[in-house]
Amino acid sequence: MRSVGVVVRLPSKGRPAARAVVLEGSWDSPILVDAFDLTSTHADSATQLYDLAAGLGSRLSGLNADRVVIRRADRPNRASNQEGPRMRLLAEGALASSARATVDDVLLISGRELAARSPASNKDALDKHASNTLPDSPAEAAAAGLVGLV
């Protein structure tokens, strides 16, 4: 089984970026195959989203992934009308669409939902397991990839 875990971040420049890990094996003994970042240098939002989606699609075309798990942003305690969370949601949607064009099994779920699908008891335990099992990988992307192996 080969799983790709993806998480979107908004670095200080405000452009969305994604981190991805490619894993093989099982929950208890995953093997890190690859890790990569997806970014865009363009100023306009539509091109940034296109660049992320095209980058993921290109990488997936040669990976023979069985499943792609995109970790959605968790719901905030308070509703926000800020641009950052909106852009992250748009990026997650663009990446999910791109992934689905190449891989049949694509999950777009929150950290809480990821934990519910895993042997971990909660989101924090899931992230800790990912950090301990794959210390050189971004924890949230690794957690998503691990759930893809379950």
Image (tube, rainbow, N blue to C red):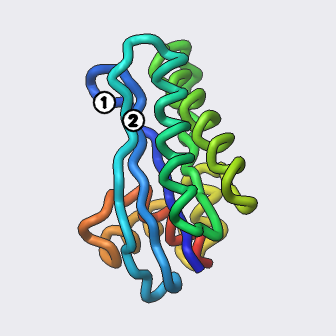
Answer few, some or many: residues within 10 Å of disc 1's Cα (few below 14, many 20 plus, some between 14 and 19): few
- What's under tag 2, amino acid-wise? Ala
The spot of residue 102 in percent (x, y) is 67, 54
In the picture, the quarter occupied by the C terminus is bottom right
- What's under tag 1, amino acid-wise? Pro
What residue is at 42 percent from the left and 29 percent from the top?
Answer: 16
Judge from the rendering whether residue 126 lies leftward or rightward of residue 93; answer left or right. left
The spot of residue 112 in percent (x, y) is 59, 55
Q: Nearer the viewer, mark 2 or mark 1?
A: 2
| 42 to 30, vertically: above or below | above
Judge from the rendering whether residue 72 lies leftward or rightward of residue 124; answer left or right. right
Give the quadrant of residue 97. top right
Compute the Cα span from label 2 to label 1: 7 Å
Rendered image: mark on residue 110: none
What residue is at 33 percent from the left and 23 percent from the top?
Answer: 41
The spot of residue 108 in percent (x, y) is 66, 49
What SS does tag 2 mark? strand
Give the quadrant of residue 44. top left
Farthest right residue? 104
What SS does tag 1 mark? loop
In the picture, the quarter occupied by the N terminus is bottom right
The spot of residue 113 in percent (x, y) is 64, 57
The residue carrying mark 1 is 11
What residue is at 56 percent from the left and 47 percent from the top?
Answer: 57
Residue 41 visible? The answer is yes
Sooner in the amino-acid sequence: mark 2 or mark 1: 1
What residue is at 59 percent from the left and 58 percent from the top?
Answer: 69
Instruction: Pick the residue in front: 82 or 57.
Output: 57
Farthest bottom residue? 29
Q: Is the C-beta separation of discs 2 and 1 under 8 Å? A: yes
Residue 77 visible? The answer is no
The residue carrying mark 2 is 17
